[in-house]
Image (cartoon, grey):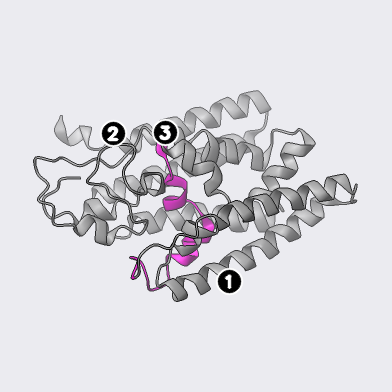
Amino acid sequence: MKRIKKYLPPVIIFLIFEAVAVVLWLTKNNLFYLFNFSYIGASISLGLFLFIKKYKHARRVVQLLVGLYMLVYLGLICNENMQIEGFWYYLFTGVFEAATIHYAVAKIFGPLIFGRGWCGYACWTAMVLDFLPYKTPQKPRKKIGWIRYITFAASLIFVSALFLARVGNIERIMFWAFIIGNVLYYGIGAALAFIFKDNRAFCKYICPVTVFLKPMSYFSLIRVKCDKSKCVNCGKCKRVCPMDVDVTDNSRKRKNGTECILCLECKKNCPKDAL
């Protein structure tokens, strides 16, 4: 029974995504949604299964499966802007499609269940930045997280201006915004990683999507928790955390609590299996 129980998380995650897939397929009458969310759910479940089997690259497998699918297939081949500009675009046109559905599931309501799991397992920007050498922060976190609100506002103003100016062929502009946006994100993200010696500097200070993710993640059902009876306060979990989260504190107000990306590096490195 205990052996079966440890495989429940990947099964539950797959069933959640499959439920979303079926509902959207039937309500939107579009088979694409069945494939899309089934594929993402299966990829994440596979990663969790590999993690349980102690495969050290389990999360990277998921990042590549989901990140490349969204970047190459949805973005480059299907010409869908899955970044925040695409969300504003579909929101202003009043259409519940593509980016609006993606944001609703992965970045607005989904975090109530899996927190910032998107950042750890599916983000195509982090997928690339995580290949850089500074997987754990080498310097203290800077107090410049306010920049994310500027980039968030800039994306909203950009798309609003296109609609207010009644610019033609906005769909094509959205595609090029996706291309240029990704080039800028990768360039800035890589530069910040080397400047701050932290692969996740872009996520902490610049990424506009975190404006949606952080408040919802506060209430996340799936969280890393610490068994105080096993913890010896060695501090290793804090040192290996790429997002500077104090996972030994089980309260929702723990330090950088809404930053946890569920990468589970803390759990893998805990010498007492307290997490």
User: Tag 3, which secondary structure?
Assistant: helix
Q: Residue at x 14, y 48 (%)?
A: 273
Residue at 50%, 51% in the rendered image: 66
Within-10-Å neighbours for mark 2: few <14, some 14–19, many 20+: some
Residue 103 image offset from top left, x and y in percent: 59, 40
Residue 114 colored magenta? yes
* The residue positioned farthest toward the front in the image shown: 143
**Quadrant in which the C terminus appears:** top left
- The numbered mark, 1 or 3, whose residue comes first in the sequence reads 3
The amino acid marked with disc number 1 is Gly
* Residue 116 x/y as whole percent: 43, 45
The image's mark for residue 113 is: 3
Q: Earlier in the sequence, mark 2 or mark 3?
A: 2
- Label drawn at residue 98: none
**Residue 8 shows which numbered tag?**
2
Task: Give the crowd class for mark 1: few <14, some 14-19, many >=20 residues within 10 Å.
Answer: few
Q: Does 155 sit left or right of 54 as displayed?
A: right
Q: Is residue 81 visible?
A: no
Would residue 257 be visible to someone looking at this image? yes
How far apart, in angstroms, are the residues tagged by discs 1 and 3? 32 Å
Q: Which residues are magenta?
A: 113-138
Residue 153 lies in the magenta stretch = no
The amino acid pointed to by label 3 is Ile
Q: Residue 187: which disc? A: 1
Whichever of labels 2 and 1 marks the residue nearer the N terminus, that label is 2
Image-based side of 107 in relation to 242, left or right: right
Helix, strand or loop under label 2: helix
Rendered residue at 39%/59% (across/down):
60
Which is in the foreground here, disc 2 or disc 1?
1
